[in-house]
Amino acid sequence: MSKLYLVPTPIGNLEDMTFRAIRVLKEVDLILAEDTRTSGKLLKHFEISTHMQSHHMHNEHRMVESVLQKLKAGQTIALISDAGTPAISDPGFLLTRACVQEGIPVDCLPGATAFVPALVNSGLPNDKFVFEGFLPVKKGRQTRFKLLAEETRTMIIYESPHKLVKTLGHFCEYFGEDRQVSVSRELSKLYEETVRGTAKEVLTHFENKAPKGEIVVIVEGK
């Protein structure tokens, strides 16, 4: 029976791949991968020989219909991103929505996603939180910060290394220098690090030590 599987992949440490994820990737007819070169290394490590096809932010709109046709023809397909759970700041939503609308079964496996360990590690309240993903780079950025300044729940933000200092500076400007912040980078990898403190303290830290790697920022609510 046709089905779309959303399969999380490790965000760093390959030991975080689940037995079920490996089995599903071996059994499906096709794997849609964000970057076939990156995913090729993962599949080779786990001796998975299933055929892959590229499915990324630049082609997902035009690919939805062709993938739907494969599913309607009875194929089982798995969607993976370079790291973490598909559709969380990665391609996956459009195809999932289309499958739901067409009545095609969708099964998202549990597994790695970067913001959960970052949130728990932060020591900030996690009973209620809001996931912001990547903030606007230019258009709408100031408006977003003004709205988030009034947010009472803990905020989760993804950021790139070369923009982190600028973003931390905006935290100081819009949220206040004393707002508690936690920055986790390279989660599950060899040089994993979490830096906690006020917005000003964390900004000073990364002004003196240039950040590297994948970054998740947790910000205290108002």
Image (spheres, rainbow, N blue to C red):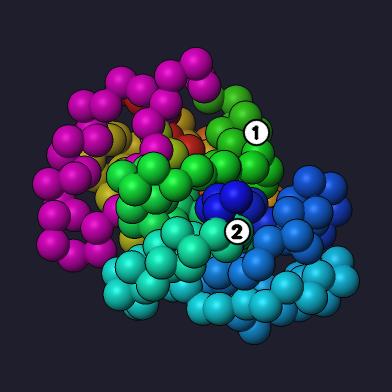
Q: What is the x, y in percent for residue 171?
A: 32, 44
Asked if residue 83 lies in the magenta stretch, the reply is no
In the image, is 124 to the left or to the right of 191? left
Regarding residue 157, the answer to whether it shows in the image is no
Of badges 2 and 1, the one in the foreground is 2
User: Which structural element holds mark 2?
Assistant: strand
Location of residue 129 in the rendering, given as x and y in whole percent from the top left corner? 42, 26
Amino acid type for the residue under numbered disc 2: Thr
Point out the stretch of residues depicted in magenta: 125-154
In the picture of the structure, the residue carrying the numbered disc 1 is 121
Circles 2 and 1, Cβ within 8 Å, touching? The answer is no
Q: Quadrant of the C terminus?
A: top left
Residue furthest to the top: 127
Q: Which residue position is annotated with label 2?
A: 76
**Is 219 or 61 nearer to us in this picture?**
61
Labelled disc at residue 49: none
> Residue 76 lies in what quarter of the image?
bottom right
Q: Could you tell me which residue is drawn at 39 percent across and 57 percent down? A: 95
